[in-house]
Image (cartoon, rainbow, N blue to C red):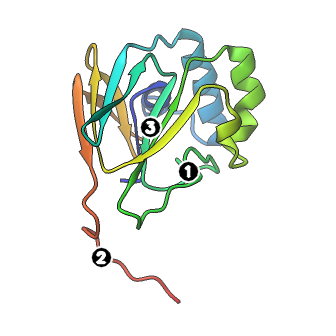
Amino acid sequence: LVTFGCGLDAVISHRYATSTFRGLFSYFYHGLRAFSSYQSTVVTVHANGHMEYTGQPLLLTLANTKGYGGGTVIAPQARADDGLLDLCIIDPLSLRTSLYHLRNLFNGRIERIPGYHHTQIREAKIQRQERGPIHVDGESLMGNREIMMSVLPGAVPFALPT
């Protein structure tokens, strides 16, 4: 897992997957279109056995690495080898505020976005009011009302040059 999302990012991923329009500009196009009609639902996140968040997030992402791709940085603190997932949440924002802070999604300063929450976790149970779109590493899927995620440290062996 690189990233998982069940907020606006999942809707954008779904729009992108069903479109013939490709490239980075396409993500911005679909992002603006999705943002204009996005209605978040109440989500409760239990992380490491404790309630971590209840609200209607604009974005809710679990990340194992820093970004989605295309230069985005959703979790600047994330490390693929630390045995943790980074829970990143952005509360609802106006279009104006979102556009103003969009640069912070690319320059590694996402913590400057109002309503950004971050915590590192080992496991999460996400409960939503209804089924809805999710994405796993950018692949669009339909997700259940309840989603369980956990880390399996060291499950994928790999070698890196020194």
Helix, strand or loop at label 1? It is loop
Q: Which residue is mark 1?
A: 69
User: What's the amino acid at mark 3?
Assistant: Thr
Residue with the most extreme front position: 50
**Mark 3 vs 2: CB contact within 8 A:** no
Residue with the most extreme right position: 100
Residue 6 x, y percent position in the rendering:
39, 29
Tell me the mark number nearer the camera, choosing from 2 and 1.
2
Q: Earlier in the sequence, mark 3 or mark 2?
A: 3
Name the side, left or right, on which 29 lies relative to 136: right
Residue placed at 71% from the left, 36% from the top? Answer: 112
Residue 17 in which image quadrant: top left
Q: Which residue is mark 2?
A: 157
Residue 90 in which image quadrant: top right
User: What's the amino acid at mark 1?
Assistant: Gly
Name the side, left or right, on which 155 lies relative to 108: left
Q: Earlier in the sequence, mark 1 or mark 3?
A: 3
Residue 61's label in the rendered image is: 3
Tell me the mark number nearer the camera, choosing from 1 and 3.
3
Residue 115 x, y percent position in the rendering:
60, 25
Residue 133 x, y percent position in the rendering:
35, 25
Helix, strand or loop at label 2? It is loop
User: What's the amino acid at mark 2?
Assistant: Pro
Residue placed at 75% from the left, 38% from the top? Answer: 103
Helix, strand or loop at label 3? It is strand
Q: Whole-Å distance between the Cαs marked 2 and 1? A: 22 Å
